[in-house]
Amino acid sequence: MSETSKVALITGSSRGIGAALAQRLAGEGFRVIVNYAGSAGPAAAVVASIEAAGGQALALQADVADPVAVGVMFEEVERAFQGIDVVVNCAGVMQLASVADSDDQLFDRTVAINFKGTFNVCREAARRLRDGGRIINFSSSVIGMRSPTYGVYIATKAAVEGLTQVLAQEMRGRGITVNAVAPGPVATALFLDGKSPELIERMSRVAPLERLGEPGDIAEVVAFLAGPQGGWVNGQVVRANGGLC
């Protein structure tokens, strides 16, 4: 099957890293589904950008924390494109607080989107992906940093890594690889919001490459894992972080 007949569903792809992934995979010839929870305008803009460059894209709304909505989204993709080959779990939230100060709302929302959302999408992907497909989840390199106030966020990403490695084993016999990408700090709203310029500057110097990552840096890693060159990488967590940890 040629890349131009393959279909990639990317959750949380209306902005930031997800939008960069959508545009990058569209550039490789994938027909791309731009999933969003509430940002219809930015999602439409990503679709328009892909189509302007000669690609095919479709925006679909679904809250990944809702298993029914996720199932409906997969059904809509199958109706539109007759199958799915690549699923990228990019939807995520980050709200920082110490463990002592993390209230139930913070905990429940972070778990619902980062972990349950990833699980919901992985479950549908495991049932529906065409043989030879790819499942690519998102973890985070902050797992290795053990930074205060990141407790709930790190816990969800550690769960995603465990899920990734088990699902890779369960896909035996179908040629489907399951991996996770764990970015370091990337210059997106998710990372930059709420941080002072001084803190951002200091954090940009921590990695040996002495800069923040860009969405395009992560898109290149995902494109590798989604393409034929990444076919022998399976059950792994790729820490794309400039040598941070």
Image (cartoon, rainbow, N blue to C red):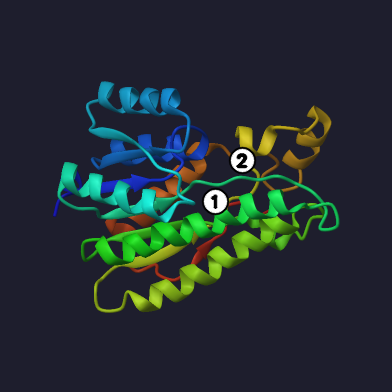
Place of residue 100 in the rendered image (x, y in percent of width and height, measured from the top left):
86, 57
Numbered-mark total: 2
Is 170 drawn above or below residue 86 in the view shown? below
Q: Which residue is mark 1?
A: 113
Crowd class of label 1 (few under 14; some 14 to 19; many from 20; radius 10 Å): many
Task: State the image quarter where residue 194 is shown.
Answer: top right
Instruction: Tell which of 96 and 144 is nearer to you.
Output: 96
Q: In the visual, does 164 lie left or right of 5?
A: right
Q: Residue at x 46, y 40 (%)?
A: 18
Residues at marks 2 and 1 touching, judged by CB atoms closer than 8 Å: no
Task: Determine the secondary structure under disc 1.
Answer: helix
Q: Residue at x 44, y 25 (%)?
A: 42
Instruction: Tell which of 139 and 216 is nearer to you.
Output: 139
- Asked if residue 114 shows in the view, the reply is yes
Q: In the visual, does 153 lie left or right of 100?
A: left
- Asked if residue 245 shows in the view, the reply is no
Place of residue 74 in the rendered image (x, y in percent of width and height, measured from the top left):
29, 51
Task: State the image quarter where residue 21 is shown.
Answer: top left
Q: Residue at x 27, y 58 (%)?
A: 228
Task: Determine the secondary structure under disc 2.
Answer: loop
What is the CA distance from the residue labelled 2 to the residue labelled 1?
A: 19 Å
Place of residue 239 in the rendered image (x, y in percent of width and height, measured from the top left):
57, 58
Q: Amino acid at mark 2?
A: Val
Q: Residue at x 38, y 56 (%)?
A: 225
In the rendering, which numbered label is found on residue 102?
A: none
Q: In the visual, does 154 lie left or right of 165?
A: right
- Give the position of the N terminus as an image quadrant: bottom left
Q: Amino acid at mark 1?
A: Ile
Instruction: Tell which of 166 and 183 is nearer to you.
Output: 166
Q: Which residue is mark 2?
A: 186
